[in-house]
Image (spheres, grey):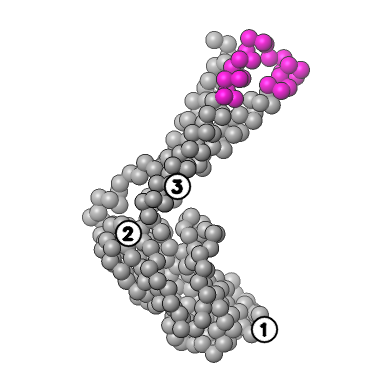
Amino acid sequence: MTSWKKAVLISLGAILLISFILGSYLYNGIIERPIVSELPGAITKVATVNESSPYYVGVEIKPDVIEMDVNETETVNINILNAENVHELLLYLAYNDRYIEIVSISSDYGLNFSKSWAYDHYALPLIKIEGKLDGVNNTTLAKITFRSTSDGKTALSFFNGELYDAEGRKLNHILHSAEIIIGNPELSEESKSFDPINFAMVTFGYVTLPLAIIYGLVFAIVFAIGKVILRIKKSDRGIIYYCIAISLLLSLIAYLTILIGLYSLLVGG
């Protein structure tokens, strides 16, 4: 076998090896690791300070730590403190929808709730909460009822967003977050279980698919210019066809894996 063919075959093996290594890293880092597990209980986050505003506004979730069994429901209050000058509110509630679901959200102050297609940096879905808050202060803005859908998992729900006064100036504000502990993470075997569907989706979706596309494009370009610039022998061009075909096959497998995984998650609730 020529050195050219060996290099091509080695690169194909490298794609699979890289996919497995990076896929495992992403899976353990994004999916299986309890979300922000290094932050115990309630967390305080301080937003960007606006020097033109002397006010600090508190947004908190109470209770801030909840232990839930499977299918158990709990209601938390979203409170706002020191909000005399708050005119408008825009918050995002991030929650781990693999382990908890939102049963209901209600507010006595006409707030609007909507599902956001944006995701936070831990790939959690967001609930957008917005509305006018003239004269609202030191009270419960909303009540949210959660239901646990899995045992032994930690699902962190936290707020991030912006508060504005009547002149449109951003207010300094302190954001509190809540850690919702479902079941007993230390004793639950389910918390350590391997989810092949999610692993396949992460591996093929985040790693194999982009690598396969890049790989195929490289060899397509090589084939296109090979005669003139690289002067690839005719006997060696078959391996380029083979590599392009492998690239397309890997891409197809990745797409099918993602579709099957998404369908499984949707059907499974």
Vertical order, 184 against 255 (above or below): below
Q: Which residue is mark 2?
A: 149
Choose the circle earlier in sequence order: 3 or 1.
1
Q: Earlier in the sequence, mark 1 or mark 2?
A: 2
Which residue occupies the foreground of this view, 41 or 26? 26
Q: Residue, x 59% and y 34% (percent of image)?
A: 213
Q: What amino acid type is highlighted by mark number 1?
A: Glu
Q: Distance of mark 2 from mark 3, alpha carbons?
A: 18 Å
Q: Nearer the viewer, residue 169 or 202?
A: 202
Q: Is residue 69 above or below residue 213?
A: below
Q: Position of residue 236 (x, y in %)?
A: 62, 13
Question: In the rendered image of this protein, does residue 55 appear above or below residue 256?
Answer: below
Residue 21 magenta = no
Q: Which quadrant of the rendered structure holds the N terminus?
A: top right
- Determine the image quadrant of residue 107: bottom left
For the C terminus, the image quarter is: bottom left
The residues bearing labels 3 and 1 have C-alpha atoms spaced at a distance of 45 Å
Residue sitting at x 61%, y 29%: 216
Residue type of the residue flagged with mark 2: Thr
Q: Which mark is residue 167?
A: 1
Q: Residues within 10 Å of mark 2 (few under 14, many from 20)?
A: some
Q: Position of residue 32 (x, y in %)?
A: 38, 50
Mark 3 crowdedness (10 Å alpha carbons): few <14, some 14-19, many ≥20: some
User: Could you tell me if residue 45 is visible in this image?
Assistant: no
| Secondary structure category for the residue under label 2 | loop
Q: Which residue is mark 3?
A: 262
The amino acid type found where label 3 is placed reads: Leu
CA distance for labels 1 and 2:
43 Å
Q: Nearer the N terminus, badge 2 or badge 3?
A: 2
Kindly check if marks 1 and 2 are in contact, taking CB atoms under 8 A apart as contact: no
User: Badge 1, how many Cα within 10 Å: few under 14, some, many 20+?
Assistant: few
